[in-house]
Image: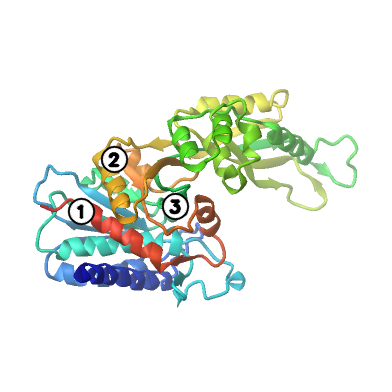
Amino acid sequence: MPGRVSRVSSATSETVELLRALVREACVNTGEASSGGEIRAVRVLQRFLAEAVERRCCETRVFEASPGRASLVARVRGTDPDAPALGLLGHLDVVPVDAERWTHDPFGGDLIEGEIWGRGTVDMLYLTAAFATAFREVALAEERPRGDLLLLAVADEEAGSDYGLRWLLREHPDAFGVTEALSESGGMRMGDHVVVEVAEKGSAGRRLVVRGTPGHASIPFGAQSAAYAAGEVLQRLAAVAPAVELGALWRSFVEARIDDPDLAGRMLDPVRLDAALLELGGIAGYAHAASRVTISPTVLRAGQAHNVIPGEAHIDLDIRTLPGTTDDEVDALLAEMLSGLSAEVEVRHLRGWPATESPEDEPLFDAVRDAIAQTDGSPVVPIMAAGGSDARLLRELGIPSYGFGLLSADWSYERYRQRIHAHDERIDVASVELTVEALRRIVSARVG
Ligand SMILES: [Zn+2]
């Protein structure tokens, strides 16, 4: 056994060092085409894989959607072209920081008291690093896997993937031959279960264009200000309550997370659910989002000059949909909300995508469940994520894709939600170790 332990810890320390190197490259994605600079992280990965490439154990290709916006695709050829080809999908970009609010340098990659600090450590560089470690280990092993193993380390996940996976899939509509995939975000604790994301809500963004009549602000009497009309629309929006819809994953969430049978019973009843939300503490927001379409006004704009009554106002809505929600249903919900205002308010469609789900009766899901059980002893709970990730682009192609990870015991789902994109983002070495260990089990089971 000592041999096995030291192997695990060396894979962990390699992953930790790679994670720290990726953090230091600071591939901050502001949404501007010129941001990101993921080519720097790609070079880190190229150095990490250099020996495997030199020994012709794997092939790598770098794709640059625009200058600096690079993604790396690496492949270990399997022995059986018909065996499933597993893609390990990790993004390289991170969201911006407010550096003054951080206790340590957000791009220092410091290792302090068993935690690696820095932007992106949780979302999702620890996982991208673990994917690279597992990939390299398979590449350098004597025995080849049955099916191909691919590492897809991509740009621009945080801003819509136009320079990352969405672009790559336009160039390679066969998704590089990947037939199943692991990506973010899983591994959080829900009760004594470990989360595997099997579905993600969809997005149906809308812009409400509210019209009034512009005029000089010094004589407001009788004016039709778009600002007041926008205020009325916002009041109505606050009162919209999309219907509760409890899908197939709802029951598994409730059973994993809620110990009290009375509370669980009320949560399974669409009529009594909303009153029960108040008793849920930190998980209430997730429970609310997972049980209905949600609408959040985000960007508001009206007016150009201090002394001009605005003739037009824009209200952008972030609308998150459930599996099966149609665009027409979203528009009908808004039309009802706007009843009587249709002359003043136009609804425009912003970019959206449907909710996506992967089945649980897939060999890869079984492999994830078994690896987590063997590593940690915990059962898994399949859930639907409220947000979105690149995994949806693969699910849209019919490729089963799961949000993976195995975080240490303190990582409740709500703690995870609080930590990502927040100040002082950091991950513990213990979580890196658990994730690497579970991942090695998944990929080594595909050999021989
Ligand atoms: Zn992410």
Q: Judge whether residue 65 can be spotted in this image.
A: no
Report which residue position mark 1 lands on.
149
SS for tag 1?
Answer: strand
Cα separation, mark 3 vs mark 2, equals: 23 Å
Q: Earlier in the sequence, mark 3 or mark 2?
A: 3
Looking at the image, which residue is at 35% across and 45% down?
402
Q: What numbered label is drawn on residue 231? A: none
Q: Is residue 20 above or below residue 126?
A: below
Q: Judge whether residue 50 can be spotted in this image.
A: yes
Q: Position of residue 84 (x, y in %)?
A: 18, 44
Q: Is residue 165 left or right of residue 295?
A: left
Q: Residues within 10 Å of mark 2 (few under 14, many from 20)?
A: some
Q: What numbered label is drawn on residue 188? A: 3
The N terminus - image quarter: bottom left
Q: Earlier in the sequence, mark 3 or mark 1?
A: 1
Q: Residues within 10 Å of mark 3 (few under 14, many from 20)?
A: many
Q: Amino acid at mark 3?
A: Met
Figure colour scheme = rainbow
Q: Earlier in the sequence, mark 1 or mark 2?
A: 1
Report which residue position mark 2 lands on.
399
SS for tag 3?
Answer: loop
Looking at the image, which residue is at 40% across and 50% down?
186
Q: Position of residue 151 (x, y in %)?
A: 26, 57
Q: Is residue 107 left or right of residue 143?
A: right
Which of 138 and 295 lies nearest the eye of the viewer?
Answer: 138
Q: Position of residue 205 (x, y in %)?
A: 54, 39
Q: Cβ of disc 2 within 8 Å of ligand 1?
A: no
Where ligand 1 lies, by image quadrant? bottom left
Q: Is residue 133 above or below residue 211?
A: below
Q: Amino acid at mark 2?
A: Ile
Q: Is residue 22 above or below residue 85?
A: below
